[in-house]
Image: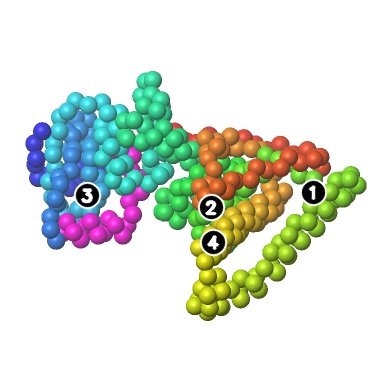
Amino acid sequence: MTIQTLSVSDIRRNERQPREFFEPTALQELADSIKRFGLMQPIEVRRDGEAGGFEIVAGERRWRAHQLAGLTEIKAIVTDDGLSEIERFKRSVAENINRADMTPMEEAKAFKRLLDEQEGAEAKGVAKEFGKSTQYVMLRLALLNLTEEVQQHVNSGAIGTQAAVQIAALTPGNQAAVMKKWAKGAFAGDNELVHFAYALKQQQGQTFALLIEDMTPEEREERQRERTETRSKIDRIERVLSLLEELGKADPMKLALALEGEVGKRMDQMDRVADAVAKARWNLRQAKAHAEAREIARLNPDAEHESLAAKAKPQAQPEGAAVPKPRAPRRQAAKKAAAPKPAKPAAV
């Protein structure tokens, strides 16, 4: 193993290395830094006996930055380690994965390749090799169910990993419907996208009693009763608003006198109210997501997409609140239309 100064043009990338996406702004910053201060850490290459020259083992980003900076030479560690191609691939993954250099999609494809090409490889063993949990590896693998359009947005960072995991559990048709809604700016942030996609996942495999005419008189009566009771409860809560506004405008010194000996007790009381309001508000946000998702599920009744992400539930919720389980339909209005199976992800 020796350090040499090599011609940038004599070096080529490993076409099967794990990284595919290099963020342009960050790459330009690295190029500017190298041009000003030099290369702090040499790249690692191996002699390519077949094609000639050298193939990168580790450090493609630094090599690209040299090209961007217009530099013609680069310091490199020339290794003759005798490692197999899959072992070199693992070294490249290890170099990038724990430095946040890889995108979630690159990680997913890297794990898939290791599982496919290493004899006897399992998710648990791959996770241990790279200091990750088995769940981490499984959820990354789930991202391979994403359509190409969604994958591009995940690679660019426009869609976060948690939202991507939920979207990956959807059929290709439903993914397209979500992306159409997302492109119109329908979601305030990733959190709303997470819950919307999760709601749609719960609904995409169900059938609905779409028309009230399809219900029995008893079912129509029960639905109307539920609507009346729920709306009445929310209306009663609204009446408390004026009391809270009055309390919010009160003089603190007068409040202290009025509640002498009970301020702490009343604070605890108000904290319980605030906690209940937060949970109710979260539940209503979920209801909104379900209402919007149901419209897509009606218009796009694809077959359910089997996915590793199907068990993943959104995490952003108030403490103690549970994601509501979908209610089973009382009767089916129509049989769900058959749909083609989702395409299998391409091999890495």
127 or 34, nearer to the observer: 127
| Residue 81 image offset from top left, x and y in percent | 17, 28
Closer mark to the observer between disc 2 and disc 1: 2
Q: Is tag 4's residue or tag 3's residue first in the polypeptide sequence?
A: 3
Residue 62 disc label: 3
Q: CA distance from mark 3 to mark 1?
A: 58 Å
The residue carrying pointer 4 sits among few (fewer than 14), some (14 to 19) or many (20 or more) residues within 10 Å by Cα, namely few
Instruction: Identify residue for label 4.
Output: 265
The residue shown at (22%, 49%) is: 62
Q: Extreme right residue here?
A: 217
Q: In terms of image quadrants, where is residue 18?
A: top left
- Tell which circle, 1 or 4, labels the residue nearer the N-terminal end: 1
Q: Is residue 208 left or right of residue 282?
A: right
Residue drawn 15% across the image and 33% down it: 79
The image position of residue 106, as x and y in percent, is 38, 42
State the image coordinates of residue 108 (x, y, percent, origin top left).
41, 38
Q: Earlier in the sequence, mark 3 or mark 2?
A: 3
Q: CA distance from mark 2 to mark 1?
A: 32 Å
The reply to whether the magenta stretch includes residue 220 is no
Seen from the viewer's position, the closer of residues 224 and 333 is 224
* Residue 58 horizontal side relative to residue 276, left or right: left
